[in-house]
Every structure is written in C-alpha cells, then in structure tokens.
C-alpha cells in the first residue's frame, strides 16, 4: 500500500501543491484531476521517485521509498508522456527490453500474446518508426500486460488512442484493479473509470 | 554558550547576518592589505639587489595562488554539504564563491606572467605549477558555465555541485600528471616547499596578505550570496517586505 | 531469482540494445571515425610534411584527435534515450542505475572507442611511425579510451537536454581528460627511444581506467537522476 503524507512540491520558485496527503490501497484507483500546470505530472514523478519533493514523505508498505531504493522500482510501472520505445527497434524488441527494465521475466510467447491482445498482430517485426502515433502508444501500453508490478502510475494514458484502444485499456485497468492492483491515473478526457474503488483527487484549487 | 548553527542555514536568517558581517570583513581586508603591502615593500630586508625588485609581485602572486586553491576546496565543501543535507543556502554559498575563486586564479596567472617576463624573459612557460593553475581556471569556468546554462535552479545547483566534486576528485590526479609527465623519472618527485626557504620577514608579509585576501573573499562571497538570496527568494514574504520597506 | 544473474542479464540486454540500435543507424558510427581521420590528416597539411617533425608530433595529435572524437560522440550517449523516454525507464529499473550506465558506456566504447584503436595504423602510415611505436599507440588507445568514455559519461549526464550542450560538454570534460592525454601521448613518445620505458605509462593508464570504472558509473547515475528530475 502506498501512502503519501504532507508532501509539498515546487518547480522553480512556484509551489505546485502543499501538504498533500492520501493513500492508495490494493484494489484502489486514484484519478488525479487538475488544470494544466497544477502539478499532476510532478506528483506522479514524485511518487515514482523521479522527483524529490520539498518536504513530506512517501511510504510503500510503511517504508520510505527513498530507503527502498531499487526494490521499490520493482513494485512500480510508470507510463509517462513519452512512450519509452525506440523507433529503430521492433515492437517485440522494445517489449523485451522494457520487460527486463521493469524487472519482469517474460518469454517470446508472452510478448506475442500481449501484442496480439493490444491489437498489433502482424506489426511485431516492423521498426516502430513506421507505426502511427496510436500504434506506438499501444506498444507502450503492452508493457502493462507483461508486468507483475502492483502499482501502476499512468500519466495521460488515453492520449492518441482510438475508441477501441480506449475500451481495451479500460478493460486492462479493470482487470488490474480486480486482481488487487493499484492505479494512479491522470486524464483530461472524459473516460468512465468504472473500476473498483475509484477515488478522485483534485489538485490546485 | 552554544550557537544554533542550523538557525543560520536558512536564507532568511542568514541574509541580515551576512549584511552585518560584510563591512567588517571589508575593513579588515583593507587594513590588512595596507599593512601587508607596507611590510612587503618597506620592511622586508634589502637582500634583493636593485635588479630583483620585481620579486615583490610575489606578495600578491603567492597569496592569490593559495586563495585560488582554498576557495575551490571551500566551494566543493559547500557543494558536498548541499548534496548531503539538501540545504539551499549551501548551494548558494558554493555558487557565490566560484567567481572569486576564478578571479584569484586569473590574478595568479596574470601576476605570474609578469614575474615570468621579468625573471625568465617569457610571459608563459609550461611550468607544472602554471599549467595546474590554468587547468584550475578551466574547472572554475566549467562550474560557472554549467550553473548558468541550466534554467531550473535546483538542477543547476545540484548538477554543478556534482561537477565540482568530480573535479575535486580529479584534481590530485591532474596535478600529479602535470608535475610528472614522465613516470620513469618521477621516483624522486618532490615539490620543494617555498615557505621554509624564504626570509621570515617576507613570510610575515605573505601571511598578512593571505589573511587580507581571505577577508576580501568572505566579504565578496557574502555580498554575492545576499544578491543570490534576494533573487531566488523573490516570491517569499520576507523579501517582498524587505524590498518594499526600502523603496 | 538471484539478484546477480538478473543484473548481468540486464547489463547484457542494454549492451546488445545499444549495439543493435547503432547497427541500424550506421552513419552515426562512421561520422565519429571519419572525424578522427580528418583531424589527424589535417595536421600534416598545416604543419608541413617533414618526416622528423611529423614523427615528433604524431603522439600528441593522435591523442588530441581521439579526445575530441570521443567527446563528440558523447553527446549522443544519453540524448536519444532522454528524448523518447527510455531513459526514464532505466531510472525506474529495479537494478542499480550505475550498472545500466556502465552497460551503456561499454556499448558506447565498443562503437566509438574501439574503432579508433583499430584505425590507429593509418595514423602510423601518415606520420611515419615505427611498428613498435604503432603497437604502443594502439595499446595505449585501447587502455586509455575507456577512461575517456567513462569520465565523459558524467559530463554527458550533467548536460543532458541543455541548449548548447555540446560546447558546454567539452568545457566540462576536456580538462578532466588531461591525465589520459599526458600519459597516452607520453607512452608513444617514449616508445621511440625504448619500448621498455613505456611500461609505467601503460600501468598508469590502466590505473586511471580502474579508478574511472569504480567511480564514474556512480557519478553518472547521480548526474542522470539530477538531470531528469
């Protein structure tokens, strides 16, 4: 379980949010809301451990994530604005590497199944350079099908996706929550997040 | 009596303290410089023949050279404190010391060139000490360049602090390799100490000048750090109040 | 699942990844190599082609050219991964970041340092070096260029994503290259009189490499975390 207590983050000399506290338990989905520049991405990056907050603590199962170090990263999958895929590699190669970096054991078969489910069957041997924006996003999302990490941090995962992909991602989110996973998500689009105990947190009032 | 040092690690409390101390350091620096130079020019024994009067540039040259090295160490010290304790003021101190260090390094090279021209008949020689000093200047410039190239102050502070630390680790190696380009003849590498070889009277003048330069460096660093504090904390309530009051 | 074997596996995957990427963009590789060749070829045109002078300046020129070539290539070390977000994934990998950094530097050296070692005989031809000196030059480059890649990686990480990062990188990194330059070029110069005399130079270069191998990946990892906040 993730608990965030009294964190304050600033960029330059602008304080984005002050003394923010919340927790995410297994089976929870937290939907972060807020205007542009309200600090959603910064908050997500702090929770990942990529950004150091000015004050406050973030705990994973009662241990500070700063003390957990690399062990914490095994528990987290972060999907940021960038897809995190190499244009010159094929979807399959990208996923193999991503799985290694996420600390997951996978084999070729699992990757093929994941690509098939995400709707990229037949594209697995092409360099991702030739894929469309939406297809590239799908490659990035396929990581979610391969990972065993309980905490997913998704920053605008629905951008560039068509309706069928949005439905699919919703389904994946639902499954993860049903399996006692945890998700923190930001999205501007009006997407019905029907899964589990959906909580909402509004930033920047 | 115990002083709460952490109280002064906040920019808000340090700002007035630095302001109060700056004039003192300035005065002491000025007085010591007058005394030191007077001593150096008029009280040193006339062991020097008339042709060797150029020797007196060393009263500026040697203290400046020492300062250039000490200030680098000071800068690295503050940078390390900042990296460990994540205190903003330490980074500001490191950033404020760097320009003074660079100026002393430049002064060393400049006065050294005059010395070289009069004593050896050349402005520049690839003497190990001169080369080391030149490389030190490069390191200062690199630090300041990195600091000013990054817009985000936090990244600028931490990145340049790390660079200063890496530089400090490399300095002994660089210094050694410059001093001893041929390892086959380096078994007897021994930097002769310049301190014990000179007249005690000259040594006194040097020491006074070193203290004067130290005080000057403190004064300038404090003045600079006050500016940095104001600039970075411009949105803080106490700065708005302070600036508003002065208008 | 033992930690050590996953670490080795991650290391291998990253090295192979960077080699594969480079093989699919071969021009990048060749530019560094040709930069080295061009710089080395320019000097005889500027200094004159007298053999005695060329022999004397060859070690210094070959090493300065190697320094510049390795530095030019450094800019690309993390930039691509930074832009497409894969660097973020590495920062969030459950392995020590310094291991991943080391893997990237190893791949980078195989792609940009090793070719310089292999092209060195060309310098030998152009500058009329004896076979013995040429051997020492190749050996010195082989031991010295990994240090350049390792130390340079720190600079590349610090200047990540900055405007004018390339010029800044050279300002930060070149002064730190000086010891390698002095002993690398010194070894070749010493080899002209006696091959046996070059041993201490090569030992020192090896020492630098080990020192850099221990400290540089750690410093680079710290720099990457600072730069990608």
Image: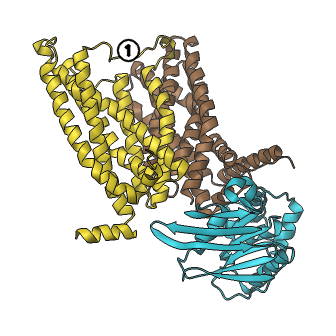
| Letter of the cyan chain | A
Q: Classify C33 as above or below A165.
A: above
Q: Position of residue B74 (x, y in %)?
A: 41, 39
Q: Which residue is mark 1?
A: B192
Q: Residue at x 61, y 29 (%)?
A: C143
Which quarter of the figure is the C terminus of chain C placed in? bottom right
Q: Is residue A39 left or right of residue B72?
A: right
Q: Classify C202 as above or below A180.
A: above
Q: Is residue C102 left or right of residue A75?
A: left
- Which picture quadrant has residue A109? bottom right
| Letter of the brown chain | C
Q: Position of residue C105 (x, y in %)?
A: 63, 44
**Nearest the eye: C178 or C217:** C217
Tell me what hue chain B is rendered in. yellow
- Which picture quadrant has residue C205? top right
Farthest residue to the left: give it.
Answer: B50
Farthest residue to the front: give it.
Answer: B1
Residue A146 appears in the rendering: yes
Tag 1: Cα neighbours inside 10 Å, few (<14), some, or many (≥20)?
Answer: few
Secondary element under disc 1, as helix, strand or loop, is loop
Q: Is residue B200 left or right of residue A28?
A: left
Q: Position of residue C42 (x, y in %)?
A: 41, 36
**Nearest the eye: C49 or B183:** B183
């Amino acid at each position: 379980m993730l608990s965030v207590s009294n964190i304050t983050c600033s960029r330059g000399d602008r304080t984005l949010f002050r003394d923010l506290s919340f927790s995410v338990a297994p089976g929870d989905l937290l939907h972060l809301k807020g205007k542009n520049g309200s600090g959603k991405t910064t908050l997500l990056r702090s929770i990942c451990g990529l950004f150091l907050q000015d004050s406050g603590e973030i705990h994973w199962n009662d241990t500070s994530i700063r003390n957990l170090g690399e062990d914490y990263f095994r528990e987290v999958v972060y999907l940021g604005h960038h897809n995190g895929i190499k244009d010159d590699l094929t979807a399959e190669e990208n996923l193999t590497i991503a799985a290694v970096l996420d600390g997951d054991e996978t084999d070729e078969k699992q990757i093929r199944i994941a690509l098939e489910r995400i709707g990229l069957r037949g594209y697995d041997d092409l360099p991702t350079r030739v894929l469309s924006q939406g297809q590239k996003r799908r490659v990035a999302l396929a990581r979610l099908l391969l990972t065993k990490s309980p905490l997913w941090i998704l920053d605008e995962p629905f951008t560039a996706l068509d309706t069928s992909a949005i439905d699919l991602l919703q389904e994946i989110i639902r499954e993860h929550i049903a399996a006692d996973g945890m998700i923190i998500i930001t999205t501007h689009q009006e997407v019905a997040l029907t899964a589990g105990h959906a909580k909402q947190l509004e930033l920047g009032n | 009596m115990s002083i709460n040092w952490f109280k002064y690690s906040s920019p808000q409390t340090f700002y007035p303290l630095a302001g109060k101390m700056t004039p003192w350091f300035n005065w002491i620096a000025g007085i010591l410089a007058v005394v030191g130079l007077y001593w150096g020019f008029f009280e040193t024994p006339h062991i020097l023949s008339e042709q060797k009067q150029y020797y007196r540039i060393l009263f500026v040259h040697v203290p400046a050279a020492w300062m250039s090295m000490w200030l680098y160490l000071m800068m690295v010290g503050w940078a390390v404190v900042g990296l460990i304790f994540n205190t903003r003021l330490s980074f500001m101190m490191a950033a404020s010391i760097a320009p003074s260090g660079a100026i002393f390094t430049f002064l060393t090279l400049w006065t050294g060139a005059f010395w070289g021209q009069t004593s050896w008949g050349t402005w520049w020689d690839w003497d190990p000490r001169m080369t080391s000093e030149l490389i030190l200047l490069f390191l200062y410039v690199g630090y300041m360049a990195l600091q000013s190239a990054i817009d985000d102050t936090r990244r600028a502070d931490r990145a340049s602090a790390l660079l200063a630390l890496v530089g400090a680790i490399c300095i002994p190696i660089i210094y050694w390799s410059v001093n001893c380009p041929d390892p086959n003849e380096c078994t007897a590498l021994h930097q002769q100490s310049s301190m014990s070889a000179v007249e005690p009277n000259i040594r006194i003048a040097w020491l006074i000048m070193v203290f004067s330069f130290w005080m000057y460096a403190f004064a300038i660093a404090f003045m600079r750090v006050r500016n940095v504090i104001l600039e970075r904390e411009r949105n803080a309530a106490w700065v708005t109040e302070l600036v508003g009051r002065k208008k | 699942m033992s930690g050590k074997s996953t670490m080795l596996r991650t290391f291998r995957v990253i090295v192979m990844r960077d080699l594969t990427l480079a093989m699919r963009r071969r021009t990048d590789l060749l530019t560094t190599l040709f930069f080295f060749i061009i710089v080395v070829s320019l000097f005889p045109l500027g200094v004159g082609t007298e053999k005695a002078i060329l022999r004397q300046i060859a070690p210094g020129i070959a090493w300065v050219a190697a320094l510049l070539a390795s530095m030019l290539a450094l800019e690309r070390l993390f930039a691509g991964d930074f832009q497409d977000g894969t660097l973020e994934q590495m920062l969030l990998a459950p392995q020590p970041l310094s291991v991943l950094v080391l893997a990237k530097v190893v791949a980078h050296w195989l792609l940009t340092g090793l070719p310089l070692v292999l092209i060195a005989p060309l310098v030998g031809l152009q500058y009329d070096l004896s076979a013995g000196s040429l051997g020492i030059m190749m050996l010195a480059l082989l031991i010295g260029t990994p240090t350049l890649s390792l130390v340079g990686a720190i600079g590349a990480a610090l200047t990540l994503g900055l405007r004018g990062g390339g010029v800044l990188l050279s300002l930060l990194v070149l002064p730190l290259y000086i010891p390698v330059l002095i002993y690398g070029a010194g070894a070749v110069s010493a080899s002209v009189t006696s091959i046996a005399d070059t041993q201490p130079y090569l030992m020192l270069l090896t020492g630098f490499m080990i020192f850099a191998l221990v400290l540089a990946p750690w410093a680079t990892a710290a720099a990457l975390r600072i730069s990608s906040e």
